[in-house]
Image (cartoon, rainbow, N blue to C red):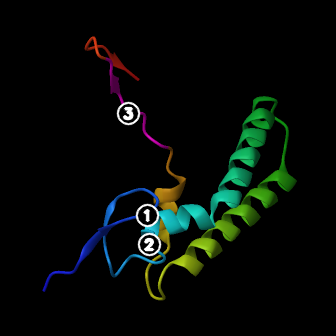
């Protein structure tokens, strides 16, 4: 038995209707729910990089990072249906985006 496939209202990705909520795919719902926490995590990671260059101990910063990561996992857990593993969704969310090459009209490939 095949299920109906519709585009996500936000990203346009083809998604089964069983995964759509409010017209959005699971990935978009997770991105929307964790937007503020991801911005905070990026800010704190930048701060950590600056301090690590100076070899400054940062136990308070480590605690802040742990709190933000826990909040991020909790937000993902709220979006996912009960029983679905949270780890793959969080790992996918936190992985750095890959650069995609663009081809110019002249045939050059740009990063």
Percent x, y of residue 68: 73, 62
Q: Label 3's element?
A: loop
Q: Label 2's element?
A: loop
Q: Which residue is mark 1?
A: 9
Total labels: the figure holds: 3
Q: CA distance from mark 3 to mark 1?
A: 23 Å
The vertical placement of 37 against 79, above or below, is above
Numbered disc in front, either 3 or 2: 2
- Towards the viewer: 36 or 51: 36
Magenta segment includes 98: yes
Percent x, y of residue 84: 43, 82
Tell me the number on the disc at residue 100.
Answer: 3
Percent x, y of residue 39: 69, 51
Q: Earlier in the sequence, mark 3 or mark 2?
A: 2
* Secondary structure that dominates the magenta span: loop
Numbered disc in front, either 3 or 1: 1
**Disc 2: CA contacts within 10 A as few (<14), some (14-19) or many (>=20):** some
| Residue ID at (49%, 69%) | 87
Circles 2 and 1: CB distance less than 8 Å? yes
Q: CA distance from mark 3 to mark 2?
A: 27 Å
Percent x, y of residue 12: 37, 57
The vertical placement of 15 against 56, above or below, is below
The magenta-colored residue range is 97-104
| Residue ID at (64%, 75%) | 74
Q: Earlier in the sequence, mark 3 or mark 1?
A: 1
Q: Which residue is mark 2?
A: 23
Relative side of 78 to 40, left or right? left
């Amino acid at each position: 038995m095949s299920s109906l496939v519709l585009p996500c209202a936000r990203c346009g990705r083809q998604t089964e209707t069983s995964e759509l909520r409010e017209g959005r795919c699971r990935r978009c719902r997770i991105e929307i729910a964790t937007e503020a926490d991801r911005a905070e995590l990026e800010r704190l990671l930048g701060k950590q990089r600056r301090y690590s260059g100076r070899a400054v101990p940062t136990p308070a910063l480590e605690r802040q990072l742990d709190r933000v990561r826990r909040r991020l996992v909790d937000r993902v857990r709220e979006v996912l249906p009960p029983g679905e593993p949270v780890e793959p969704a969080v790992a996918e969310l936190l992985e750095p985006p890959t650069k995609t090459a663009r081809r110019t009209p002249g045939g050059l490939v740009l990063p």
